Image: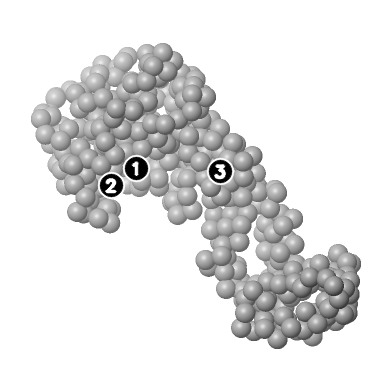
Amino acid sequence: MKFIHTSDWQIGMTRAFLSQEAAARYSQARIDAIRALGQLAEEHEAGFMVVAGDVFESNQLSAQTLSRALDALNSVPVPVFLLPGNHDPLDASTLFRSKAFREQARGHIIVVENSEPIPVPGLANVEVVGAPWFSKRPGVDLCAQALKTLEPAPGVTRILLGHGQVDSLSPDHSQPGVISQALLEQALAEGRVQYVALGDRHSLTKVGNSGRLCYSGTPLVTDFDEVAPNQALLVELDNEACRLTPLTTGFWEFQALQRDIDGPDDLAAFAQWLDAVRGKECTVLKVGFTGSVNLALAAQLDALLEAQSPLFASLKRRERTTDLAVIPDALDDNAIALSGYADATWKALLARAASDDTATDALRLMYRLAGGAGSGAKVAADKGGRGA
């Protein structure tokens, strides 16, 4: 018996660091991932699919986004079980009971609204048991509550759907909604369930040693610290074994880098690395720089980032981790021609640059405007002009 375990679709998610153009493509990619999951289910002959929480980014979605998501869901060729999570709980505003959802969702789309075992259509003796969220802050361990009255059913294969952090991974055990890993493992050992499909962590994460307790991760990357995103799990269960196979579902990449720039060779190596990145339009980079450079090299770095930025979904300097000392030298003075007020401003900024980052930034700008970065432009002497 095979099925697809996925979670944290968060349809409608936006990312503030993306341009309007990239954000639209990213939003569509989250919906495209649904169709990809349907194709994978068909390719691997999976009998059904479970989504372990956070189908939607929130219960306030535009009608267009909801319609497009449901159109993608309708195209999935197997039954799909949707578990409400902390982003889209079954509260008074839930999308799962909205008129649009009820009218557009086809019969193979099954919302898990309680913890009663639900037979999987088309499969004998296979059930899904869920622990749906009814608010954003549950006061109890919802998985423990779902298992409380569940007894073993010989000959029946059960999948438990849960959402949230297990206590072995949670940084805050005081939260009442934290899931007890021990209770999940006990339910597996007693045969009350045969697999626990978890959601909430966006990184593919196996929990414990049973091989039957796992977070699938998100089908499309959402942040820089995720490990093995862009995946879902193909779960193969029989009487004796459980086999988990990661399947690729998305192609966006979020990378946080750190580069040392201390000379022209370092900058050339970084330029070559950027040029070699494939799928730039689906790649989000934030780069922190360390080292020591003169104004010429700093200007070349600025120009490189400016030229490459339109090619990427996002390419930004990581200010929090950037510690790049810009130290003007004699070569910088020789590289530009200034006179009058501009020359006086240049010299005044040079005197302040060692202790004033703003002065250094102004020098970098003046250097580029004056042609030091290769533009050939000059800052005209103008006593009535404005200082840098």
Three-letter residue code for mark 1: Asp
Q: Position of residue 10 (x, y in %)?
A: 43, 36
Horizontally, residue 1 falls left or right of residue 101, namely: left
User: Label 3: which residue?
Assistant: 252
Horizontally, residue 232 falls left or right of residue 81, namely: right
| Residue 200, label in figure | 1
**Quadrant in the picture for residue 326:** bottom right
Q: Which quadrant holds the N terminus?
A: top left
Q: Nearer the viewer, residue 190 or 37?
A: 37
Three-letter residue code for mark 3: Trp
Residue at point 22% right, 26% down? 114
Up the image or down, 322 lies above or below 225; here it is below
**Quadrant in the picture for residue 20:** top right
| Residue 165, label in figure | 2
Q: Position of residue 241 (x, y in %)?
A: 27, 36
Residue at point 79% right, 85% down? 330
